Structure formats: C-alpha cells, structure tokens
Amino acid sequence: MVINSIQESNTLELLEKLKEENIKLHEENRKLSETVEWMHDTIWNLVHINRMKN
C-alpha cells in the first residue's frame, strides 16, 4: 500500500515536471518561429530593395 502511494506520488511529480518542460519548450519554439519569420521577412525586404537598385 505504501509503495503504491510512493510510486503514484513519484509519477505525479514526474508528470508535473514533464508538463512544465513541455510548456517551456513550446514557448521557446514560439520565440524561435517568430525569429525565423522576422529573418525571412528581413531577407526578402533586402532582396527586394537590392533588386530595385539594380
């Protein structure tokens, strides 16, 4: 009985840690996606400007 309670507690703690890590990874992914989008837009704007000059 006690062992089951300990295992359940450990499992719940592990699940909570995994949930927190998942949230952090989603946030990091969102920021990286925004950065890639910004870089893409910036590069295309520079290409457009460069083409207009030539």
Image: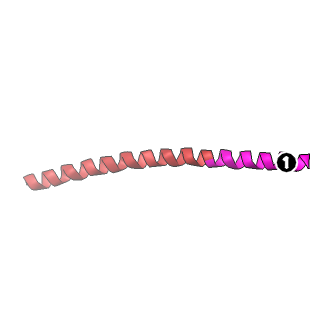
In depth, the one of 43 and 21 nearer the eye is 43
In depth, the one of 9 and 22 nearer the eye is 22
Q: Is residue 38 left or right of residue 7?
A: right
Q: Residue at x 52, y 49 (%)?
A: 29
**Residue 17 magenta:** no
What is the three-letter code of the residue carrying label 1?
Asn
Q: Residue at x 70, y 50 (%)?
A: 40
Q: Is residue 35 left or right of residue 18?
A: right
Q: Position of residue 43 (x, y in %)?
A: 74, 48
Range of magenta residues: 36-54
- Magenta stretch prevailing secondary structure: helix
Q: Is residue 19 left or right of residue 6?
A: right
Numbered disc 1: secondary structure: helix
Q: Residue furthest front?
A: 54
Q: Position of residue 6 (x, y in %)?
A: 14, 51
Q: Position of residue 22 (x, y in %)?
A: 41, 49
Crowdedness near tag 1: few (<14), some (14–19) or many (≥20) residues, C-alpha within 10 Å:
few
Q: Residue at x 19, y 52 (%)?
A: 8
Q: Which quarter of the rendered picture does the N terminus lie within?
A: bottom left
Q: Is residue 46 left or right of residue 34?
A: right
**Residue 48 magenta:** yes
Residue under label 1: 50
Q: Tell me: residue 45, above or below residue 1.
A: above
Total numbered labels placed on residues in the image:
1
Q: Residue at x 67, y 44 (%)?
A: 38
Query: How is the protein colored in the picture?
Result: secondary structure
